[in-house]
Image (spheres, grey):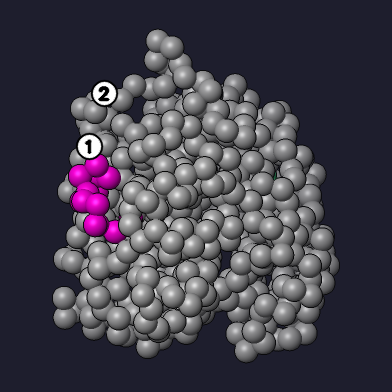
């Protein structure tokens, strides 16, 4: 414990933005991963700011620490379960087991039905809840689906008026974006933030986050594009572009680096004006990726002037046929043009995202991907990241099969073999097909998948997942005698 206190003290000394206060309503805001990952989450930071903005609420952070043992909060060092509300932000399917570990290490019984009425109310929000809240159902008293900006103040008001778990749940039942897994059989529609509540902007800056010393700001929420594999279109609701003056006003002039966040950042109408303004203010900035059809030399030069070292774009489908199937709206010329402007702007290396294991994919599609990668390598060093396609609820692919671990592994090997001799001009990184299978199971699983995760707290690997799923009676929903397709599609699909 002393070691943990010492580590927290050191991290606190390096970060900026912590809110220290005392107030009658205590909230623990926990992240089911380590400090560096949680502090790179703008949603987590936004929840912290919204909660602490309520005068009678104090929210303190807790993370799933690398050090073993009990957790404590970062602000006052109290026990995380000494709170009225225990709120968790979860982003990824594969953090499901971490959620269980987090609850246990916070001193809470993970299963909702085993907790006492005076235990903290466990709230779970974050991107995973919009994608599929069902595996979280055994653990959460309440799941927030959609934008927290609208829901969090209402939850606090409900607690203020009730002060007790059952009365609180009675009060909030029926609110948009509020899912009560113990009481409701269908998930509600997403809560959508009013444009005037945006932008979401960082509360913290720290060198210990995954994006070190970076002020994060979301300049747009939602995406109007039709890409069939992507949740952004349905998950974040209508596209809301934050006007340029509001974005600039929200960025403190003394922060050295700004991380611009948006589903498809290069569609943001003021992306060049914002980049230029930041260059003039001598603030470095970065985008996670650009759309190959939107980037031109002017934008690439602004990216360089803003200090970006990496130029990233997504092809997302190995061939034109499959990109068209996915409605990606990008063709080979766009990919080559993006590589060319990157080189002309001075980037020597670019990252390209690809997906394989798509419905109807054939050997010819992979051949085309190999040819395209070789063509891109004419313009610079290519870092190719290959991810297995994971079908998600709320998308047109909700009833497509996962291509399978072995087929995906053999397709990745096929691509690696063809491109191996071009190292280091072409470097390949591939995402594990086994973990993609686990992700696919969680992405379309029900409460039983959460119960499988409960069995994996001590030891988690692919074989253990398969065993645990069998033990809880999981069946591939697409192979069930009566596939529950409306459930798979979910609301809003
Ligand atoms: S892949 Fe990008 S452009 Fe397509 S819908 Fe998703 S965020 Fe929008």
Q: Determine the image quadrant of residue 114.
A: top left
First in sequence: mark 2 vs mark 1: 1
**Quarter of the picture holding the N terminus:** bottom left
Residue at x-position 31% and y-position 45%: 139
Main secondary-structure element of the magenta-colored stretch: loop
Given contact means CB atoms under 8 Å apart, are the residues at marks 2 and 1 in contact? no
Instruction: Give the left or right position of residue 398, taking residue 72 as reference.
Output: right
Q: Against 87, is 450 above or below?
A: above
Residue 258: % across, % down: 62, 75
How crowded pointer 1 is (Cα within 10 Å; few <14, some 14-19, many 20+) is rated as some
Residue 305: % across, % down: 73, 77
**Quarter of the picture holding the C terminus:** top right
Residue 445: % across, % down: 40, 32
Q: Against 414, is 156 above or below?
A: below
Instruction: Give the left or right position of residue 78, taking residue 32 as reference.
Output: left
Q: Nearer the viewer, residue 49 or 55?
A: 55
Residue at x-position 37% and y-position 88%: 13
- Look at the numbered disc 1 and give the secondary structure of its residue: helix
- Look at the numbered disc 2 and give the secondary structure of its residue: loop
Q: Mark 2 points at which residue?
A: 473
Q: Which of 97 and 246 is in front in this view?
A: 246
Instruction: Give the left or right position of residue 443, taking residue 69 as reference.
Output: right
Figure label count: 2
Residue at x-position 65% and y-position 74%: 285
Q: Which of 420 and 406 is in front in this view?
A: 406
Residue at x-position 71% and y-position 65%: 196
Residue 58: % across, % down: 40, 75
Task: Read off the magenta span.
Answer: 109-121
Q: Residue 464 carries which label?
A: 1
């Amino acid at each position: 414990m002393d070691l943990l206190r010492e580590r927290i003290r050191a991290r606190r000394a390096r970060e900026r933005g912590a809110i220290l206060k005392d107030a009658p309503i205590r909230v623990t805001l926990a992240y089911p991963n380590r400090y560096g990952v949680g502090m790179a989450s703008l949603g987590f930071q936004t929840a912290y700011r919204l909660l602490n903005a309520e005068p009678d609420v104090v929210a303190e952070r807790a993370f799933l620490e690398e050090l073993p043992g009990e957790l404590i909060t970062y602000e006052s060092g109290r026990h995380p379960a000494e709170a009225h509300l225990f709120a968790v932000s979860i982003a990824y399917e594969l953090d499901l087991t971490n959620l269980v570990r987090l609850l246990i290490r916070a001193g809470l019984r993970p299963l909702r039905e085993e907790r006492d009425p005076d235990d903290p109310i466990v709230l779970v929000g974050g991107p995973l809840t919009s994608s599929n809240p069902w595996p979280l159902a055994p653990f959460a008293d309440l799941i927030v689906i959609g934008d927290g900006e609208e829901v969090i103040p209402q939850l606090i008001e409900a607690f203020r008026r009730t002060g007790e778990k059952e009365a609180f749940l009675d009060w909030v039942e029926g609110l948009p974006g509020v899912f009560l897994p113990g009481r409701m059989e269908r998930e509600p529609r997403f809560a959508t933030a009013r444009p005037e509540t945006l932008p979401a902007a960082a509360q913290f800056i720290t060198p210990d986050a995954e994006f070190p010393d970076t002020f994060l700001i979301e300049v747009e929420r939602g995406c109007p594009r039709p890409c069939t594999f992507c949740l952004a279109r349905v998950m974040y609701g209508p596209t809301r572009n934050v006007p340029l003056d509001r974005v600039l006003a929200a960025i403190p002039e003394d922060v050295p680096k700004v991380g611009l966040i948006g589903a498809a950042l290069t569609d943001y109408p003021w992306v060049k004006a914002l980049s230029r303004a930041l260059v003039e203010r001598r603030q470095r900035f970065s985008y996670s990726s650009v759309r190959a059809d939107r980037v031109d030399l002017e934008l690439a030069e602004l990216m360089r002037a803003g200090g970006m070292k990496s130029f990233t774009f997504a092809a997302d489908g190995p061939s034109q046929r499959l990109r068209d199937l996915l409605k990606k709206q990008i063709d080979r010329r766009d990919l080559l043009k993006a590589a060319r402007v990157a080189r002309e702007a001075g980037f020597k290396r670019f990252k390209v995202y690809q997906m394989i294991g798509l419905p109807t994919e054939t050997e010819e599609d992979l051949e085309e991907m190999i040819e395209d990668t070789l063509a891109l390598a004419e313009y610079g060093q290519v870092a190719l990241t290959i991810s297995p396609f994971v079908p998600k609820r709320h998308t047109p692919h909700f009833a497509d099969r996962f291509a399978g671990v072995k087929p995906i592994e053999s397709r990745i090997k096929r691509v690696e073999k063809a491109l191996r001799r071009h190292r280091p001009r072409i470097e390949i990184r591939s995402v594990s097909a086994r973990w993609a299978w686990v992700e696919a199971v969680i992405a379309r699983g029900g409460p039983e998948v959460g119960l499988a995760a409960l069995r994996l707290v001590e030891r988690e690997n692919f074989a253990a997942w398969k065993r645990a799923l069998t033990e809880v009676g999981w069946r591939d929903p697409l192979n069930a005698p009566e596939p529950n397709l409306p459930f798979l599609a979910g609301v809003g699909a």
